[in-house]
Image (tube, rainbow, N blue to C red):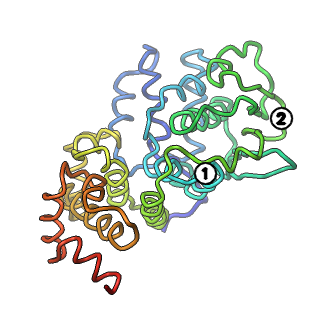
Amino acid sequence: MRTLLQPTYATQVLRPFWSFLRRYPQIPAALIEKAETADPERRVPVAEAQELLRGAVMLTGEQNLGLLAAREIQLGAFEVLEYAAASAPTWRAALETAFRYSHLMNEAANFHLDVVGDKAHVVLHSTVPLVRAGVEFQSAAFHVVVTHWLDPMPTEAEVWFSLAAPQDDSEYQKTFGPNALVFDAPFNGFVFDAARLETKLVSSDASLHGVLRQHAERLLAELAKGDGLVERVRAQVLATLKDGPVAAEDVAAQMGVTRRTLTRRLAQHGTSFTALLEEVRRQAATHYLRSTEHSIEDIAFLLGFSESSPFVRAFKRWTGLAPAAYRRASRGR
């Protein structure tokens, strides 16, 4: 069993740094290539990552490395954690979801939401001391992901840093836009009007949110055992099904590995991408039929089918029943 005596980062957390550091000849290309193609299950101790960041700042002379790397983050980079939060009903629910499952990306995360008077305090604390680049990246990454999924961070929001103010804060301003910067603050995080917490999210999807949280719970359990690859693939497939057919190449790319590597690692777990895709579609289909009023056509779309007839055939293969018959039987009608 793994313990949190040495908290770790998921490899996805460090990927934006490798992307940015490719621009610097001082960083050996072979080192970056090795890091980018690492086993998707490998996790890096947070303390070790902070020393790597310290060294990268020294080698490149880039004092704003954390801010610049965070701006490399792509939509969906943090996998099920990101999708589960984005599908929540409100800002409050999104934050609570993100904080509950934050250890999937960062086991040193001790993030929480405090409401003080009419202000919401989003506290981004780390149980492992962070170098300046680590602090900057943590806050900037949060800001970038929120901006990806929600409306831009509220203009009244303040970005708080326990760090001393830099001589030049221009990169901070580029990263955080119009939001006020507060240095030498009591904590690292954000402060904004608490009323914002009840704002509904445009990306909210109650059905998808429930299923993604189930996957996230399983991932937390798998993380404790140090073996979460299969559940990560399931969650990634589920989160992207509604966008159309899901290809193994796309999932592998999202996880930062080649399709060949993903195929090999899944085979070591006794499964395959095709088998997992079928399993996720079957589980999601039965959930939608039992627990929602979505039409058969809508469910087919949510599962990545171009039309309902292939879905109906697949569902009969999975369960022996047509979707409509399964819905009636599951509800005792």
Foreground of the two, 169 or 158:
158
- SS under mark 2: loop
- In the displayed structure, 256 sits above or below 317; it is above
Q: Specify whether 63 is left or right of 261.
A: right
Quarter holding residue 327: bottom left
In front: 77, or 271?
A: 77
In contact (CB < 8 Å): disc 2 and disc 1: no
- Residue 299: give x, y in percent of width and height: 29, 59
Tell me the kind of residue under disc 2.
Ala
The crowding category of the residue bearing disc 2, from other C-alpha atoms within 10 Å (few below 14, some 14 to 19, many at least 20), is: some
At label 1, which amino acid type do we have? Thr
The relative height of residue 328 versus residue 29 in the rendered view (above or below) is below
Looking at the image, tell me whether mark 2 or mark 1 is earlier in sequence order.
1
Q: Between tags 2 and 1, which lies in front?
A: 1
How far, Cα to Cα, is label 2 from label 1? 27 Å
Circle 2 is placed at which residue position?
185
Q: Position of residue 228 (x, y in %)?
A: 39, 59
Residue that label 1 marks: 90
